[in-house]
Image (cartoon, rainbow, N blue to C red):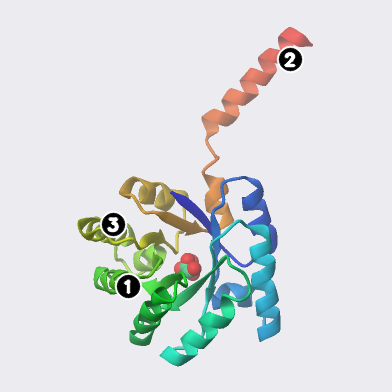
Amino acid sequence: MKFFIDTANLDEIREAYDLGVLDGVTTNPSLMAKEGITGEANIRAHYKAICDIVDDNVSAEVISTDFAGMIREAEELVTIDDKIVVKIPMIKDGIKAIKYLSDEGIRTNCTLVFSAGQALLAAKAGATYLSPFIGRLDDISSDGLQLIAQIVDIYDNYGFETEVLAASIRHTMHLVECAEIGADVVTCPLKVITGLLKHPLTDSGLEQFLADYKKGNG
Ligand code: G3P
C-alpha cells in the first residue's frame, strides 16, 4: 500500500518523507492557495520544490476544463520533473484527456471521483490513479469507504491496472479501513499518518520499561 501526503506544505512533506514511509504527494488548487502559492512561475517552482523532496508521484492538477487546455497544461507540467503525475478532473473532456495522455505514456490521476460509474470510465480511459473522495461523501451522509470497496471489486473483476487512491481521508480509521478493503494508495494529511503511531499502551509500556531500566542501572 502506498502512502501519499495530501498537502502543498513543504515542511509537512519533508517531515513525512523523513519518517521513511512516504511514496508521493497529492496537491490541488485549494492546497496550493492555502500555502499562498500563486502565479504560473511560482506554482511551477513549488511543484519542482516538492519533486526535489520525494522519490516519485507528485500529483499536479490542471485548471483547464477543456480537452485542448488540459493537454497543453499536462504537457507543460510533465516538463517540470519526471515525478509529476497530471491530475485531471472527472469530466467528459477529462476522460478524453486521460485517454490521450495515457496513450502518450503520461501518468494521470483522475480526481473528484464520487461514484463507481465514474471509476469505471477512468479505468477504461487508462488513468494511472483514481481518486475517490471518501471524506466528502461521508460529509453528505453517504458512505465513502463503501465506494472504495465497490471500486476495488470492479477493478479486480476485470484486472484494470488503475490504482485506487483513496483521497479526502479525515482520520486514521479511514486509512486503516482502506487498507483492509485493499485500496492501492491513500492520500492524507500529515496528522493522519502520524496518528497511526499513537497508542496509550505503547506510551505507558515504554514509560515502565525505561523506569525499570533506571531502577536497575541508576
Ligand atoms: O486532494 C484532494 C482531496 O484529498 C481533498 O480532501 O479534505 O478537501 O475533502 P478534502
> Looking at the picture, which amino acid does disc 2 mark?
Lys
| Residue 153 visible in the current orientation | yes
- Which residue is at a point 58% across and 78% down the rendered structure image? 77
Residue 71 image position (x, y, % from top left) = 47, 85
Q: Quadrant of the C terminus?
A: top right
Mark 3 vs 1, N-terminal side: 1
Judged from the image, the secondary structure of the residue bearing numbered disc 1 is: helix
> Which of the 4 image quadrants contains residue 52?
bottom right
Which residue in the structure is indicated by mark 3?
A: 152
Q: Residue at x 38, y 70 (%)?
A: 127
> How many neighbours does mark 3 have within 10 angstroms: few (below 14), some (14-19), or many (20 or more)?
many
Nearest to the eye among marks 3 and 2: give it.
3
Point out which mark residue 122 bears. Answer: 1
Give the image location of residue 110, x and y in percent: 40, 72
Q: Which residue is mark 2?
A: 214
| Disc 2: CA contacts within 10 A as few (<14), some (14-19) or many (>=20) | few
Residue 217 is situated, as x and y percent measured from the top left of the image, at 76, 10
Check the image and name the residue furthest to the top: 216
Instruction: Check disc 2 and report its element: helix, strand or loop.
Output: helix
Residue 39 can be seen, yes or no: no
Out of 106 and 52, give the one closest to the viewer.
Answer: 106
